[in-house]
Amino acid sequence: MGGSLYLLIFIITIFIGVAIFIARTNHSKDYYADIEIDEWDCPDCGFHVQAGDKCIYCGAKKELAT
Ligand SMILES: [Zn+2]
């Protein structure tokens, strides 16, 4: 009885650890997917965009092949 209790706690601990690991991995992926941190110069107006994939000055989208 005591042995199976420790086994149950052991399995639950591993399950929680895996769940936290998956949650943190998914969260970090979403975090980096949503925020574009590369700086680029708008080809239409020349505005230096520091964040995002869209020019905040004229609304042009960032060209992918640069
Ligand atoms: Zn622009």
Image (tube, helix red, strand yellow):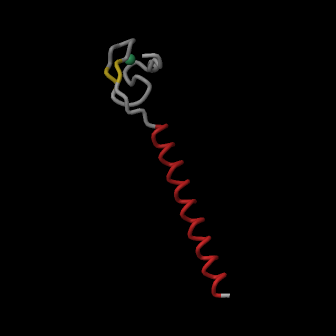
Q: Is residue 63 left or right of residue 2?
A: left
Position in image of residue 9 (x %, y %) = 59, 76
In front: 20, or 41? Answer: 20
Q: How many marks?
A: 0
Is residue 46 positioned above or below 9 on the image? above
Is residue 11 positioned above or below 49 on the image? below
Q: Is residue 3 left or right of residue 37?
A: right
* Quadrant assignment for the C terminus: top left
In front: 53, or 7? Answer: 7
Ligand 1 falls in quadrant: top left
For the point 46% across and 43% down, the residue is 31
For the point 57% across and 66% down, the residue is 14
* Quadrant assignment for the N terminus: bottom right
Q: Would you identify the image quadrant in which residue 42 lies?
A: top left
Position in image of residue 45 (x %, y %) = 35, 13
- Residue placed farthest to the top in the image? 44
Q: Is residue 18 left or right of residue 49?
A: right
Position in image of residue 15 (x %, y %) = 60, 65
Position in image of residue 32 (x %, y %) = 45, 39
For the point 44% across and 20% down, the residue is 62
Is residue 66 positioned above or below 11 on the image? above
- Residue placed farthest to the bottom in the image? 1
- Residue placed farthest to the front in the image? 3
